[in-house]
Every structure is written in structure tokens, then in C-alpha cells.
Image (cartoon, rainbow, N blue to C red):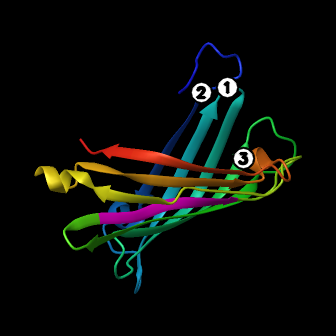
Amino acid sequence: VTDFEDEGTELYGEFASRLSLSKISGRKIGVGPLADVLLAGQLEFGDNLRTYLYGIGTSWTIPGFAFFNLDFYVRDEQGRDGDPTWQITPSWLVPFGVGPVKASFGGFIDFAGSQGDREESIIGAPQLLVDVGNFLGAPDRLHAGIEYQFWRNKFGIDGVDEDVVQLMVKWVL
């Protein structure tokens, strides 16, 4: 529960976009399992935070995966001493079934370099979800399960780690 009256509470958001070079150029850029190369960008924003990420994304065709992406960014946190750093972000989704149960394993991991007084950090959120909608006659609409969020050197602070298991409900409109 978020308490917006608590002075320690801050809002945070992200906006991310990837533009396919294959679609922009009108010809396939990928080779073999490399399906596409993309221009990738992201904005992270919140109270006293603005971080720009820009770089190259890749999409891969891997058997069993609905998708596998690997993005390479320059990470520039505004107001932070030091030169911009780097970030590598894999993201994936693997659908599977066990008898009549449709499920998926997906998520992301951000590997970020140090910048100014901030240490390198790793944050990830793998998710295990069951397609509950499949039992209600609306497949791929309602998913429920767990997400495990881990963060090493949270906010780039050496030794500050976080591990949280969360219940997750995903409703697809």
C-alpha cells in the first residue's frame, strides 16, 4: 500500500521505446537468430530523478521463447557527478504448459555501471505467471503468479541489497 501522505514516499516512472531498423529501412537487418536491430531509448523519472538511456537494442529468435531482447545503453543520470555509464538489459518471455495449465516465465535484469559516487548495480524481476483467463474462457487476458525482485547495490549504494517476493496480477486489455 502506498501512503501518499508519508513524506518518505516518492513517485517513479519509466517510458521506454524501441524503433526497428528493419521496419524503418524496409529490409531485414537481422542475420540467423538475430531477428532485428533497434534504436532503443528509455526515460526514468521521479522526485529528484531524471535518467536518460539511449543505445542499441537487439531482438533474437530462440526456440521456446515468445521473445528474447538484449539492449545496450548509455546511461546518463542527470545531476550525477562523473561521465555517463553503461547498462545492459536482457528481457524475455517463455510460455509453457503443464497439463491444462498455461503459464509463462518472463522478466528482465538491468546490469548498470557505476557513475559518480554510485556503484555498479543489478536489478531484476523474474515472473512466473499462470494464465487464469484460460480457465474462464478468456485466454491470455488475466494472469496471476509471483514476481521476485532482487536489487544488488540498490540506488548504486555499495552493500545495500533488496530481495522481495511479490504477488502479481496482470490484466491484458
Dot 2 falls on a residue whose secondary structure is loop
Q: Nearer the viewer, mark 3 or mark 2?
A: 2
Q: Quadrant of residue 169?
A: top left
In the displayed orientation, state which residue is furthest to the left.
137
On screen, 25 above or below 40?
A: below
In the rendered structure, are the residues bearing label 1 and label 2 in contact, judged by CB atoms less than 8 Å apart? yes
Q: Which residues are magenta?
A: 103-111
How many residues crowd mark 2 within 10 Å: few (<14), some (14–19), many (20+)?
A: few
Residue 135 lies, in percent from the top left, at 16, 55
Q: The disc labelled 3 sits on which kind of residue? A: Asp
Residue 144 lies, in percent from the top left, at 34, 50
Identity of the residue drawn at 41% across and 65% down = 105
Identity of the residue drawn at 39% across and 80% down = 62
> Which residue position holds label 3?
76
User: Of marks 3 and 2, which one's residue comes earlier in the chain?
Assistant: 2
How many residues crowd mark 3 within 10 Å: few (<14), some (14–19), many (20+)?
A: many
Distance between the alpha carbons at the discs numbered 1 and 2: 6 Å
On screen, 56 above or below 146?
A: below
In the displayed orientation, state which residue is furthest to the top.
5
Identity of the residue drawn at 40% across and 87% down = 32
Residue 57 lies, in percent from the top left, at 51, 64
Residue 138 shows in the view: no
Q: The disc labelled 1 sits on which kind of residue? A: Asp
Distance between the alpha carbons at the discs numbered 1 and 3: 16 Å
In the rendered structure, are the residues bearing label 1 and label 3 in contact, judged by CB atoms less than 8 Å apart? no
Mark number displayed over residue 47: 1
> Which residue position holds label 2?
11
